[in-house]
Each structure stands twice: as structure tokens, then as C-alpha cells.
Image (cartoon, grey):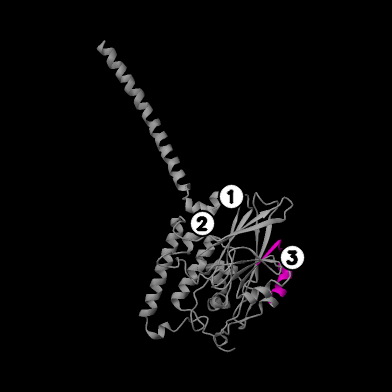
Amino acid sequence: MKRDTRKMLAAALTLLTGLLPAASCQNSSAAGDADKASATAMSPEFAARLGKDDGFAFSLLFGADVQGNLKDCGCPKHPQGGLAWRMGYVDGLRKIAPDAPALQLDAGRIFAHSVGGYVQPYDRVRNEWMLRAYGEAGFAAANVSYFDLPMLAELLHKPEFEAKRQLFPFAARLVSANIRPTRPDLAAPTPYVIETVAGKRLPKPVRLGITGVTMSNPNPSAETLNFAVEDPAEALKRVLPELRAKSDFVVVMSYGPEAQTDKVTKVPGIDLVIVANNLGAMILQVQKVNDVSVVQAFSQTKLLGDLRFYYAPDGTISQMRLSMPSLDKDIPTDRRWEQMVADAQKAIDDATKATVDAPPAESAGPASPAPPSKP
């Protein structure tokens, strides 16, 4: 009897041992599911910023005036803006509406502005990191403002032009319809780009034609001699017929005051104008100016413009809805973008220290292109 009992216990232990790995796998799988659920869970604050997926076809995300800064604004009471929170919002948008593409734009003043017509070494580092970041984030385009012209001269300097484009592919997506070089050793900026948007909620792919214009420097004595800034409306009259013929929907990014918006919206062929002027968006909704839809970008992209497009079955736009969510601590961030911001800041700090520590003769400015001089 004892021998039978021992056999029964041995059999039970064998059975239990065989079950343990399966039980362990089930627990591991359950833990993995719990981790996934935790990763996709959103705080009520973030969910409110994103809003509901109500069937929009795609989203146009826009900001401006980041001035070479990938970090947040650094405001003590309420830090806002920055690449990490912006990309966190984009990730959230993709989670709630995976079938609705999101395109990103910058309406102007992407670069840090160095005084004196050339770019300081530490500002060059800032600006190069902006190009890297926007390129890796897949931005569709950025408008060139008059503040950006010194850096533009370096990027479009013909002797280094191809090398710069290879190093910073996003430079080809710096658009301007009204900036032209005044020196033979400078190339012209890209006048426009065309981005095709395709998605399950669109009756057919939509070709977005994207261009930009800027006001000229309000201080004529400080105007750079590298480029001429043409009248925005006149430049658009020249560029738009070609762009309109290639596009289903035309977006103009306009860096300048309200008076410029009025002139730009009178040019035929424009569907949407995104206005930037470092003043902050005064009106947080879609306006109609001269029968053209107009939205305003917020300074330093503290608030991100999220313009959502809705299409009717016949392929026409039924409506556009705008929200301006704050980019702040309520938005989760991805380690990749946090690391990029940290790497950029370290490079900027190192370049600043090197400039401060360098002998005066070595900190006078870059060798190429040379500081502006009369042709």
C-alpha cells in the first residue's frame, strides 16, 4: 500500500512538473498583455487633447517660431512646446486613428538667428540639429522666414550644396516662393513641394501643394545682401499657376503680419493659408479671409495646430476642424525623441563653450560662405 502511495505521489509530481512550464508561459503572456495595455493606455488629460476619432480623413499638424530649439520653452510655471511632446502627440494621434495620416509643417523661423549676417558656430549646431530632427520626424515642409536667411545662405552655397543636401536631406523641403539669391554662388530655395496623402478614409489620394512666403526684414539697415525678398503676393502669382496645376489642395505658409495675410489670400488658387508671426495665434479656429481658409500658428509651437480634414464620398472636402492642444507634461514622450533633444543640447553646449574659449580670431565667423558683402 505504501508502495502504491509513493507511485501515486510520483505520478502527481510528474504531472505537476509538466504543467508548471505551461502555467509559467501563461503568466508571462498575461504579463506581456498587461504591459501592452499599459503602454497604450492614455491619461484622461491626453485623451481629451487628442479628441475622438470621428472619421476624419487626415490631419495637418503645424507650428512655427521654434528658433532652433528642440527643447520646450523652459517656462518655470508651465513648460510647453518642444520636439518630444510634439512627437508624443503625433504618436497618440496614430493610436486613436491609425487609418488617418498626419502631415507636419513648420510655418517659419525654424532656425536660430545670428546677428551680423552670418551664423555663429553654436547657432549652426542648433540649426543642423533642427534639420536632422525634422528630417527624421518626416516633416513635409518648413517655410523660410527672413530670420532664416543667414543659415539658408550656408545651406545653398553652391560649392557645398550637394554635400549639404546629402548630410541634411530636409534642406530640400525648406520652401519659399518669394526668396531669391542675389549672389551667383547661391542656389535658389525650393519654391514648393507636393505631398500625396493616401488613406483608407480618402476616396482617392490627395495631392497637397505646399509653398511659403515671408515678409522682408522690417529693419532695412539689417537686411542681408545674400537674398532679395520679393512681394509675397506678386511672387505667389508667378508660382501658383504651376503649383495649382499639379495639386488638388494648395497650402501657403505665410510668415508676416495681418496685412500680408489679406494680400496673400487675394491671390487666386489658394485653399489654405497658415499664418505665423511670433505673436501667438490670436484666433484658435479656422477663419475665412477673402474666401480662403486661414489658420494661425502659435509662437514657439507651445500649442500645436491640428487641422483635421473630412471628405465626402464624391472626393470633396466636407469640413475642416481645428484644435490647438497644448504641448506639455500631460503628453507622454518616446525615449527616441527625448534622447535626440538631449544629444542636441549637449552638442550646442559644447559648441558654445568652444566659441567662448576660442581666441578672438577663431570666433569671427565661418569661412564659407563669407559674411555678406556687396556684389
Q: Residues within 10 Å of mark 2 (few under 14, many from 20)?
A: many
The chief SS type of the magenta part is helix
Q: Is residue 151 magenta?
A: no
**Which residue matches tag 2?**
89
C-alpha gap between disc 3 and disc 1: 32 Å
Q: Residue furthest left?
A: 2
Eyeballing the image, is 50 above or below 12?
A: below
- Label at residue 29: none
Image quadrant holding the C terminus, namely bottom right
Comparing labels 3 and 2, the label whose residue is closer to the camera: 2
Quadrant hosting residue 358? bottom left
Q: In which quarter of the image is residue 232?
A: bottom right
Q: What stretch is highlighted in magenta?
A: 235-251
Q: Is mark 1 on a helix, strand or loop?
A: loop
- Of the numbered discs 3 and 1, the one sitting upstream in the chain is 1
Residue ID at (50%, 77%): 113
Residue at 52 percent of width and 68 percent of height: 167
Q: Do the residues labelled 2 and 1 touch (CB within 8 Å)?
A: no
Residue type beneath disc 3: Ala
Q: Which mark is residue 245?
A: 3
- Taking 220 as reference, is 264 left or right? right
Q: How crowded is mark 3: few (under 14 residues within 10 Å), some or many (20 or more)?
A: few
Amino acid on which disc 2 is placed: Tyr
| Mark 1, residue position | 53
The one nearer the camera, 281 or 107, is 281
Mark nearer the N terminus (2 vs 1)? 1
- Mark 3 touches mark 1? (CB < 8 Å): no
Q: Which of marks 3 and 2 is nearer the N terminus?
A: 2
